[in-house]
Amino acid sequence: MPPSVAGPHPARVAKSRRVVALLCHTDVVLTWAFGGRGQRVVAAASCLAISLLVAGCGKERPQPELTGFGATRAAWDAHHEAAPSGVDGSRYLPMVGDKARYDFVFWELDPRAVDYGLHFAPGTTFEQAQTQLLAEFPPGATVDRVDGESPRCLVLRIRSAPVERAIPTGIPMAVLFGPEGVDPKVSRADIRFALLGTTLDAAGEDLGGCP
């Protein structure tokens, strides 16, 4: 049974019940000591609240489905429409000018979408491109490192707990470029293309460089 839908471990449940029993027993003893009916009601209510709280502690939270970066082929195809031209499974709509928004989607080396390109409209700023990149990930994803050592590109490291759980071999990253064939120097005022992939090491320290 997948972890996202599995129940709590039996040992954890047993331990939780022992904790509840101990806390509830303490309430009963205190109630008896003070001898009031009002205290007995409070004890029963607090016992119920503790029982519900502890019972929920052992449950695993369901993980969000990956539909962008890190998605399986089935999940990706369910949320993307293939472009009318190009190699099957490598280009997806919408169109950005004469280019497919999703380009060079490569499935041969990994069963998940961890190697593809993203075209941006002319005049897309670095901040706008960053926002669009993060939309490829579940909510909560962040850019925690930007490498601008090369004048030809900007390299971003992206952190996303759900994606990193699904792909433990590397940390998501993106390499940003400016317009093709104009100026080899990338400008933060006009980002045209991003190449998404993973770092060369599992720790996410080696971002590589411009392809």
Image (spheres, helix red, strand yellow):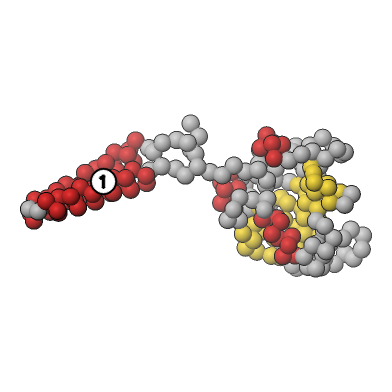
Left/right of residue 34 with respect to residue 88 in the rendered view: left
**SS label for mark 1:** helix
* 154 and 89: which is toward the camera: 89
Residue furthest toward the right?
Answer: 181
Name the residue rendered at 33%, 48% in the picture.
53
* 197 and 61: which is toward the camera: 61
Q: Amino acid at mark 1?
A: Leu
* 174 and 39: which is toward the camera: 39
Name the residue rendered at 74%, 60% in the picture.
129
Left/right of residue 179 with respect to residue 39 in the rendered view: right
The percent coordinates of residue 61 (x first, y second) are 47, 44
State the quadrant of the C terminus. Answer: bottom right
| Residue that badge 1 annotates | 48
Classify 10 Å Cα crowding around label 1: few (below 14), some (14-19), many (20 and above).
few
The percent coordinates of residue 52 (x first, y second) are 32, 45
* 52 and 150: which is toward the camera: 52
Can residue 102 be seen in this snapshot?
yes
The percent coordinates of residue 147 (x first, y second) are 71, 65
Name the residue rendered at 89%, 58% in the picture.
180
Q: How many marks?
A: 1
Residue furthest toward the front?
Answer: 38
The percent coordinates of residue 107 (x first, y second) are 74, 38
Can residue 110 be seen in this snapshot?
no
Name the residue rendered at 9%, 53% in the picture.
36
